[in-house]
Amino acid sequence: MLYQHQIDDIFSEAIGGNGLSQRAFERELEQALPAQAGIKSRHEDGSLPLLRLPAARDDLAALKPHVERLRQFAHVVILGTGGSSLGGQTLAALNDIGFGPAQGAPKLWFMDNVDPATFAELLTRLDLAKTAFVPISKSGGTAETLTQLFVVLEALEAKLGKGKVADHLLTITEPKDNALRKIAQRVGGAILDHDPGVGGRFSVLSLVGLLPAMIAGLDAAAIREGAASVLDPLLAAGEETATAPTTGAALSVALWRERGAGTTVLMPYVDRLAYFGLWFRQLWAESLGKNGYGTTPIRAMGTVDQHSQLQLYLDGPADKLFTLVIRDTAGEGTKIRRAALDGDDSLTYLADRSLGDLLLAEANATAATLARNGRPTRTLRIEHLDERVMGALLMHFMLETIIAADLLRVDAFDQPAVEEGKVLTRKYLAGQK
């Protein structure tokens, strides 16, 4: 396994009355095993296409010419929201956490909102002659993405002339007659098909996530290899053998049922996992929040949120499950020379220690403090973070979410409640109330 899934500090035997009883866990796990078997069945019959992605390679070869073309630009702007953006942002962060892209790669910009001030700044600051745009919408009818694209097309035509617009465009949408596809066809830009069977928030291992990853210089095959390292053991597991995602789903739902843990906090101690936390937030919330069920996901960041949220977590309501993602950073970075402390005894704990030592110590201390204060806490430990590990983490939480949905008896793949807001938006724009 590319990560360790440590769960001891979930249980009442370790942390006291707020913890999960073994009886409740075993009862939930018994229900989760058929859900795990259901995933195996859906992999076999092909009814859940995302499960076939870890083993696929032909589609990656087909993406290479598009990647090579887009890497000739100085900037590539992804137009999309939700699952059309967060997966790509999560993967791209492996190579760019804010200081610029890897050598030879363009700067990736993810425009996932429609604030006019932000968009105006983008179009003003970037040299459009050196910029490509990739609108992504599974349905092809996402209002935000369509509006962004109309603004971009007008700007490109004004700057470059109508005849050159297509050279700066690559569109991803379902292979059906929809608004986005019609626009792309009218302009003449290249179009890639979004698999209709892969929902947006589960699309990170498809071209939706992997095209930006490849543009950023990442190894897409390695990402899928990491995902396979989590999926394959589940597919090979016996009827009575629970894998880590199955265990995680059972823990989460059992804590909600037995202890009323209605909030789940994901807290990575890895800066490059900041967008991963936001990706998880959408995945968990939109997949499980139905029919009065679901727990509220929160993304916290270590060590930053030790100074903003930890007080609440330790001394507020005991209604949360905590998941810390900790990388072994011991010894990484420049060590602080003892002489630099100038004899200050209050700072001796820093002598001969590095940033990595401090980060790891704080992560371990937070995990221990949460447990000592009776807060159910699990830890995912990784030795390093690369494409394979990222792929493993992504697959773990997709499988955990699917199994949790089965336990809650909700459909992980729809989002019916958000449709009302979309309908009202159109009415408001039409001047209706």
Image: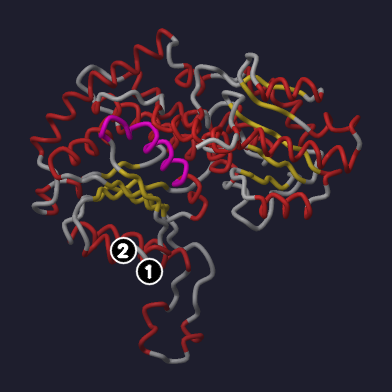
Task: Check whether the beta carbons of the residues at disc 1 and disc 2 lie within 8 A of each other.
Answer: yes
x and y percentages locating residue 280 in the rendered image = 42, 41
Most extreme residue toward the bottom is 343
Q: Which residues, given as a range, are shown in magenta?
A: 277-293
Residue at image x 33%, y 32%? 288
Residue at image x 8%, y 52%? 17
Residue 27 in magenta? no
Most extreme residue toward the top is 45
Most extreme residue toward the front is 432
Residue 278 in magenta? yes
What amino acid type should be assigned to the residue bearing mark 1? His
Q: Which residue is mark 1?
A: 307
What amino acid type should be assigned to the residue bearing mark 2? Leu
Q: Secondary structure at mark 2?
A: helix
x and y percentages locating residue 271 in the rendered image = 50, 55
Viewer-side residue, 113 vs 65: 113
The tag on residue 287 is none
Distance of label 1 from label 2 (alpha carbons):
7 Å
The rendered magenta stretch, by its main secondary structure, is classed as helix
Viewer-side residue, 422 vs 56: 422
Quarter-of-image position of residue 160: top right
Q: Is residue 243 above or below residue 58?
A: below
Q: Is residue 78 above or below residue 423?
A: below
x and y percentages locating residue 30 in the rendered image = 16, 24
Q: How is the image coloured?
A: secondary structure
Is residue 415 shown left or right of residue 152?
A: left
Q: Secondary structure at mark 1?
A: helix
x and y percentages locating residue 56 in the rendered image = 55, 19
Is residue 242 shown left or right of residue 282?
A: left
Mark 2 neighbour class, 10 Å CA radius: few under 14, some 14 to 19, many 20 or more: some
Q: Which residue is mark 2?
A: 310
